[in-house]
């Protein structure tokens, strides 16, 4: 069996202090559950001052918003409209570091980084300079020729990974990388079946859709044959686990019987995996796809380690990566052992664009920038602060059920109440989501029921930015609770 890990600003109410703690009154739901309603003596301030930025964007002089939406409806695939965020969409024009500007010149603090992809900041000067330099030399060639950027990058990337993970194949996306990893695992083991976690997302290609365990992404056609999912350890919503069981700066509020240094929930979830082997797959499988956290964990984002799997004292047989690898430039990679790579080389596989000179130059600069600018350390410092302060808001608001993550990879799960832990309805999530955007902050959404706010900013954000986001988030939750 082969394991595979898929890695794919400031102004608060009071800086450095938690947001206002209200007095609490209890009321009963129709279900009989007891909840708490916030009664604020000191509501959040109405005016939130965005941190200063000395970058001046270009004036937008392009097509109108109305014309863009007409084109989007008429010429873009309907899926483009389906996934468009917000009732009043954001029309982006320019970006710099942690900031984005729309066509009207409004500035936003980007706390989602283009779906956790802009790792070091929009148009980071160092990465931009490296890109421009390569543009003047050579845009494109393929692996049929030998060119410096490919080899310089592969050597550099390999230096960040432990032995024996030293053999690299470059792709254009995470879906492509996961497809290739599935193929490599099956070729090397001679087995076909693959296990993945429930609730996971590994891409939207026909093969990767089999790994993906989220009904929203599924189509009523055959895809990803040979893939089976098993229960994902979830100490907030799962069957087992609680306040002693999480590898995170913030524990869940759910109580459990586990001892401080011994998580019995871990044993229960392993039993579930064994049950999956007993009932759903052959005795021999090709691979187990497991995410350290069910979102993108590579390139220093978790803060404590460069790769998510390093926080769990395990070395996988393969690592797939994309997203932050190129700061938004299309790129992905599969890193594996010499033995597995040798099995793959028995046939011919060719990727026209994978590892092209532009992608390698960009990705190489990203690695340098993460190191030179201390972004992994910044992720740990600012991310831990954000989670700690968000946990204080969780203790205030009944609809914030859980705060989890590591570094600048944070999830805030919203619920109707903490007793039942039912997901906050889509219309409520949308109202809060829209309000946060209107106050100048962009975040994401995720979860099986769309109930989790995703906070994954560029790793260049400051404590000042974090305080501004916390104030906006506090205000938006307060606004919703007042209306409710």
Image: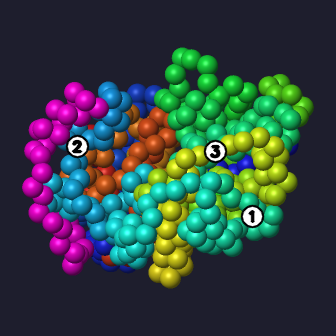
Q: Which residues are magenta?
A: 47-76
| Vertical arrangement, residue 440 with respect to residue 84, above or below | below
Image location (x, y in percent) of residue 81: 29, 32
Residue 166's tag is: 1
Mark 1 vs 2: CB contact within 8 A: no
Labels 1 and 3: the sequence-earlier one: 1
Report which residue position mark 3 lands on: 350
Can you say whether 36 is above or below 458 in the image?
above
Magenta-drawn stretch, dominant element (helix, strand or loop): loop
Q: Nearer the viewer, mark 1 or mark 2?
A: 1
Name the outermost residue toward the right: 283
Q: From the viewer's perspective, is 116 left or right of 247?
A: left
Q: Residue at x 43, y 60 (%)?
A: 139
Q: Secondary structure at mark 3?
A: loop
Count all numbered tags in the image, as a single digit: 3
State the image quarter where residue 460 is shown. Answer: bottom left
Q: Measured from the top left, where is residue 118 in percent x and y?
A: 42, 61
Q: Nearer the viewer, residue 364 or 450?
A: 364
Tag 2 residue: 89
Give the class, few, some or many, for how many residues have Cα within 10 Å of label 1's Cα (few <14, many ≥20): some
């Amino acid at each position: 069996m082969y394991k595979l890990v898929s890695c794919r600003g400031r102004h608060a109410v009071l800086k450095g202090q938690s947001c206002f703690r209200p007095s609490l009154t209890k009321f009963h739901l129709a279900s009989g559950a007891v909840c708490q309603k916030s009664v604020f003596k000191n509501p959040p301030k109405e005016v939130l001052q965005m941190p200063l930025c000395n970058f001046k964007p270009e004036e937008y002089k392009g097509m109108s918003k109305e014309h863009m939406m007409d084109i989007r409806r008429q010429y873009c695939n309907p899926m483009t409209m389906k996934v468009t965020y917000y009732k009043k969409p954001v029309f982006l024009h320019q970006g710099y570091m942690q900031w984005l500007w729309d066509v009207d010149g409004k500035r936003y603090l980007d706390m989602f980084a283009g779906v956790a992809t802009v790792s070091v900041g929009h148009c980071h000067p160092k990465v931009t300079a490296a890109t421009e330099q390569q543009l003047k030399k050579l845009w494109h060639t393929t692996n049929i020729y030998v060119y410096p950027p490919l080899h310089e990058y592969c050597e550099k990337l390999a230096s960040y990974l432990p032995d024996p993970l030293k053999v690299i194949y470059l792709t254009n996306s995470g879906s492509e990388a996961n497809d290739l990893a599935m193929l490599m695992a099956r070729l090397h083991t001679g087995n076909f079946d693959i296990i993945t976690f429930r609730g996971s997302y590994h891409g939207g290609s026909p093969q990767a859709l089999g790994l993906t365990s989220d009904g929203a992404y599924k189509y009523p056609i055959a895809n990803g044959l040979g893939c089976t999912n098993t229960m994902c350890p979830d100490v907030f919503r799962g069957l087992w686990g609680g306040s002693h069981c999480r590898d995170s700066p913030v524990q869940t509020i759910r109580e459990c019987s586990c001892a401080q240094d011994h998580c019995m929930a871990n044993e229960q979830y392993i039993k579930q995996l064994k049950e999956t082997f007993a009932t759903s797959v052959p005795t021999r499988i090709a691979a187990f796809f497991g995410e350290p956290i069910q979102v993108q964990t590579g390139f220093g984002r978790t803060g404590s380690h460069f790769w998510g799997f390093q926080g769990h004292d395990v070395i996988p047989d393969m690592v797939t990566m994309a997203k932050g690898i190129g700061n938004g430039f299309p790129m992905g990679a599969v890193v594996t052992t010499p033995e597995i790579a040798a099995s793959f080389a028995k046939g011919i596989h060719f990727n026209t664009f994978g590892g092209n000179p532009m992608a390698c130059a960009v990705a190489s600069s990203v690695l340098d920038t993460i190191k030179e600018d201390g972004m992994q350390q910044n992720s740990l410092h600012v991310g831990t602060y954000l989670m700690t302060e968000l946990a204080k808001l969780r203790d205030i608001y009944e609809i914030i059920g859980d705060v989890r993550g590591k570094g600048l990879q944070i999830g805030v799960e919203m619920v109707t109440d903490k007793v039942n832990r039912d997901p906050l309805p889509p219309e409520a999530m949308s109202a809060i989501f829209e309000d946060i955007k209107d106050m100048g902050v962009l975040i994401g959404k995720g979860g099986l029921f769309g109930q989790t706010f995703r906070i994954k900013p560029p790793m260049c954000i400051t404590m000042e930015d974090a305080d501004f986001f916390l104030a906006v988030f506090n205000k938006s939750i307060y606004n919703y609770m007042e209306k409710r």
